[in-house]
């Protein structure tokens, strides 16, 4: 993106974080009217930030080839898009009818950017969820998504909507959309993750995105070294845990 966009983003975030903190101070001092005045300004800043998010190709439907483009903050984990419990995002353009879920992983480069909120970017290497990928007709696509200095991977699932199996929280947040108008939640747990992508690539249930092209077979994202627990980032510090936090 252009330098102008990154500068606007930085200014919006600096102002928004300052107003949020000032509003919280007013609220804790029993001045709710002053707090809400500032927070209404934050709402306007959030809308401007939301509009800046670029649409990134994170998958193609394995059944139809339709692209899935998702608005993501690719500039860094300090962005509000990555705030786990206070995510500022916008809905993607209509996704293929077979789209089910998108989770993700990220290889972090330290020092990690400061975000006033908790950030949960996933494990350090890509994975699949056998409880979803093992369902009849379900297939997955993994795509590399750079985020600032970090290497992220979006893992998207496609197929018939399961009637009795929950999906999974959207990458980086604590809930997931059930289109068109519902939300639910199912947080990641390390015990459910399968990092053996080679096996799933061999079955044909997993494919990968090479630029905008859907590929089968040998994948550069398989068998990578890295942390196989879930990262939690707060105030620029990284901790690893066996499940995503409840927030």
Image (cartoon, rainbow, N blue to C red):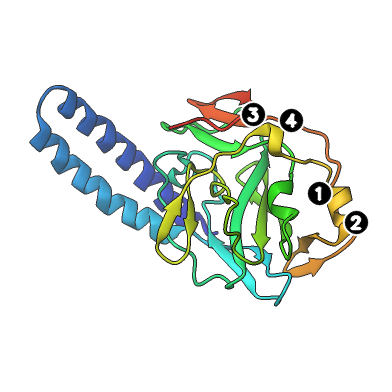
Q: Secondary structure at mark 2?
A: helix
Residue 214's x, y, as percent?
78, 68
Nearer the N terminus, badge 3 or badge 2? 3
Which residue is rendered at x = 74% and y = 40% of the image?
Answer: 125
Dividing the image into 4 quarters, which one contains the C terminus?
top left
Task: Tell me if 38 is positioned left or right of 172 in this view.
Answer: left
| Residue closer to the observer: 161 or 27 | 161
User: What distance separates the C-alpha of mark 3 from that of mark 1?
Assistant: 21 Å
| Residue closer to the observer: 204 or 26 | 204
Nearer the N terminus, badge 2 or badge 4? 2
Which residue is rendered at x = 86% and y = 56% of the image?
Answer: 201
Residue beneath disc 3:
110
In the displayed image of the protein, which residue is found farthest to the front?
164
Residue 232's x, y, as percent?
56, 29
Disc 1 and disc 4 in contact, CB within 8 angstroms: no
| Residue closer to the observer: 212 or 45 | 212
Crowding at mark 4 (Cα within 10 Å: few <14, some 14-19, many 20+):
some
Nearer the N terminus, badge 1 or badge 4? 1
Q: Secondary structure at mark 1?
A: loop
| Residue closer to the observer: 194 or 238 | 194
Q: Secondary structure at mark 4?
A: loop
Mark seen at residue 221: 1
Mark seen at residue 227: 4
Viewer-side label of 3, 1: 1
Mark seen at residue 202: 2
From this view, report whether residue 215 is shown above or below residue 187: below
Disc 2 and disc 1 in contact, CB within 8 angstroms: no
């Amino acid at each position: 993106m252009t330098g102008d966009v990154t500068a606007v983003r930085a200014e919006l975030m600096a102002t928004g974080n300052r107003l949020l903190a000032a509003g919280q101070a007013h609220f804790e001092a029993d001045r709710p009217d002053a707090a809400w005045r500032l927070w209404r300004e934050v709402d306007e800043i959030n809308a401007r930030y939301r509009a800046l998010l670029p649409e990134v190709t994170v998958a193609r439907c394995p059944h139809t080839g339709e692209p899935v483009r998702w608005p993501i903050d690719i500039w860094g984990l300090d962005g509000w898009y990555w705030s786990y419990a206070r995510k500022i995002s916008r809905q993607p353009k209509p996704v293929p009818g077979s789209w089910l879920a998108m989770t993700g992983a990220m290889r972090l480069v330290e020092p990690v950017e400061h975000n006033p909120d908790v950030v949960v970017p996933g494990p350090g290497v890509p994975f699949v969820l056998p409880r979803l990928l093992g369902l009849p007709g379900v297939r997955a696509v993994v795509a590399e998504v750079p985020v600032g200095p970090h290497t992220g991977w979006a893992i998207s699932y496609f197929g018939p909507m399961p009637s009795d199996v929950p999906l999974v929280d959207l990458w980086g947040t604590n809930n997931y959309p059930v289109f068109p108008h519902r939300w639910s939640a199912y947080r990641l747990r390390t015990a459910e993750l399968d990092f053996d992508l080679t096996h799933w690539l061999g079955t044909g249930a997993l494919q990968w995105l090479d630029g905008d092209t859907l590929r089968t077979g040998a994948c550069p994202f398989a068998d990578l070294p890295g942390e196989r627990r879930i990262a939690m980032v707060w105030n620029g510090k990284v901790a690893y845990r066996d499940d995503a936090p409840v927030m």
